[in-house]
């Protein structure tokens, strides 16, 4: 859901840095990332005092996002792309 809402706002050649918990698998969103014009570049460990553990997922924008994205409010949560 995060990728669908944020990646359309990134310019081609830009990068999206998404903070995720350690329990979330970034590879599970690979389909959505590619569909929206991005590519998974790297996953960086990012522990903090508040969370203890976590990651930063780096996504590069390599092509335009189709015009039908992002979908209307509420739909990404009910029907995720990944």
Image (tube, rainbow, N blue to C red):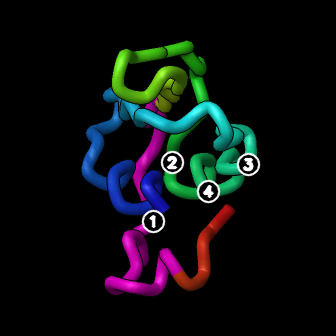
Please, what secondary structure does the residue beneath circle 4 have?
Answer: helix
Tell me how far mark 3 sits from mark 1, CA to CA: 20 Å
Question: Magenta span covers which residues?
Answer: 60-77
What residue sits 65% from the left and 43% below the top? 24
User: What percent of the width, then of the height, locates residue 5?
Assistant: 36, 61
Q: Which residue is mark 3?
A: 28
Tell me how far mark 4 sits from mark 1, CA to CA: 12 Å
Residue 68: in magenta span: yes
Does 48 sit above or below residue 73?
above
- Nearer-N-terminus badge (3/1): 3
Tell me how far mark 4 sits from mark 2, CA to CA: 9 Å
Q: Which residue is mark 4?
A: 32
Q: Which residue is mark 2?
A: 37
Give the camera-side residue of 38 and 57.
57
> Where, quadrant-wise, is the C terminus in this rendering?
bottom right
- Nearer-N-terminus badge (2/3): 3
> Could you tell whether 81 is left or right of 66 in the image?
right
User: What percent of the width, then of the height, locates residue 18?
Assistant: 41, 36
């Amino acid at each position: 859901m995060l990728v669908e809402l944020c990646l359309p706002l990134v310019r081609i050649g830009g990068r999206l840095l998404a903070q995720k918990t350690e329990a979330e698998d970034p590879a599970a969103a690979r389909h959505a990332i590619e569909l929206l014009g991005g590519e998974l570049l790297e996953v960086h460990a990012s522990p903090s005092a508040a969370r203890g553990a976590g990651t930063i997922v780096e996504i590069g924008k390599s092509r335009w996002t189709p015009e039908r994205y992002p979908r209307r409010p509420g739909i990404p949560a009910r029907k995720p792309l990944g």
